[in-house]
Amino acid sequence: MQKANTSPSKTSKLHPRNKHIGRYNFENLMKHSPELKGFCKLNKYGDLSVDFFNPEAVKALNKALLKSHYNLEFWDVPSQFLCPPIPGRADYIHYLADLIGDTTENQNIKGLDIGTGASCVYPLIGNKSYGWQFIGTDIDKEAVQCAKEIVSKNNLSKSIDIRLQINKANKLEGVLKPDEKIDFVMCNPPFHASAEDAKKASMRKLKNLKGKQPQKLVLNFSGQQNELWCKGGEVRFIKDLIFESRRFSKQCKWFTSLVSKASNLEKIYKYLETVEAREIKTIDMGQGQKISRFIAWRF
């Protein structure tokens, strides 16, 4: 078994091909999405910005980013669903392109996004950045319907196929057809092991950002139960994916998943050793002051 770690520089930066390096150009973003104007105002430094603690402002910013940088005609998600930060999602796509060795547009590349959510962000960015085809799956019927609407209204139905995962215990079985070949699997698993854990983590984050104890929890990213937590947290989710991936080793070249906590990697490596993965890579990604990562394996 070959194990490797690929890391960006110690100064945490976005991938060089990421379109979101540097400050947001709010003037340009408002031209592409006029509704963003209602959320923009000067901050204490005299720069245009939005209130990142306001869920509606974050959604308006996301919509503007997707329209201006990825030429999308339509993007919207109901307030109860996860509204992911676009720069970090784009980073996963770009580092994934490095992993599979495809950094130019290639319509023959096909990937599977587990838990694509109502936002369908990974397939949208992957298709618009590299021309990849996608299968997006989710266990939530409403999320699947929202993702299908986004795909349809952007005329991407030939490139992005959204499928409902009926069996919540499965990640690949039931959505990947027996004769279907793909180049990669990607996944952003639920971080937390319970609703209470998710709430406590969000409260800590708000306290650190605002410098004081918040009186109530207001999530600037929203999120359904299955988007934020699952039994056993991300370790259990990734463990299940690892053991299931063994059965699909001839259909997929690379299996990958985000890992939110570096302390979880040791357990994940042991599971990968158990299934006798031939090659394992841990790829670090930088986003501002935060270091994130995804693990990749193949048989």
Image (cartoon, rainbow, N blue to C red):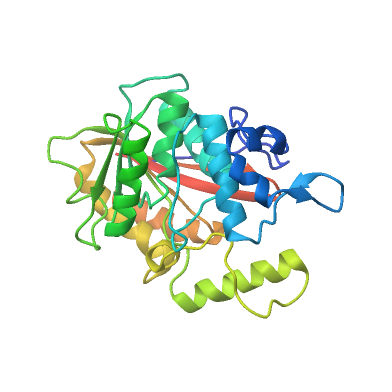
Residue 145 position in % (x across, y down): 29, 51
The answer to whether residue 298 is left or right of residue 43 is left
Give residue 148's quadrant in the image.
Answer: top left
Q: Which is more toward the observer, 172 or 20?
A: 20
Q: Residue at point 38% right, 52% down?
A: 118
23 vs 65, left or right, is right
User: What residue sits 15% from the left and 41% below the top?
Assistant: 177
Q: Nearer the viewer, residue 109 or 256?
A: 109
Q: Residue 233 appears at what percent x and percent y?
A: 42, 67
Q: Residue at x 51, y 32 (%)?
A: 94
Q: Quadrant of residue 111?
A: top left
The reply to whether residue 189 is visible in this rendering is yes
Residue 277 in view in this figure? no
- Which of the 4 image quadrants contains residue 78? bottom left
- 68 with respect to 156 (left or right): right
Compared to residue 199, the image places residue 84 above or below, namely above
Q: Quadrant of the N terminus?
A: top left
Q: Give residue 41's position: percent from left, percent from top.
A: 76, 50
Is 40 located above or below residue 270 in the figure? above
Residue 100 is situated, as x and y percent measured from the top left of the image, at 41, 29
The residue sitting at 40% across, 68% down in the picture is: 225
Identify the image quadrant of the C terminus.
top left
In the displayed orientation, state which residue is furthest to the left.
178
Q: Which is more toward the observer, 50 or 21?
A: 50
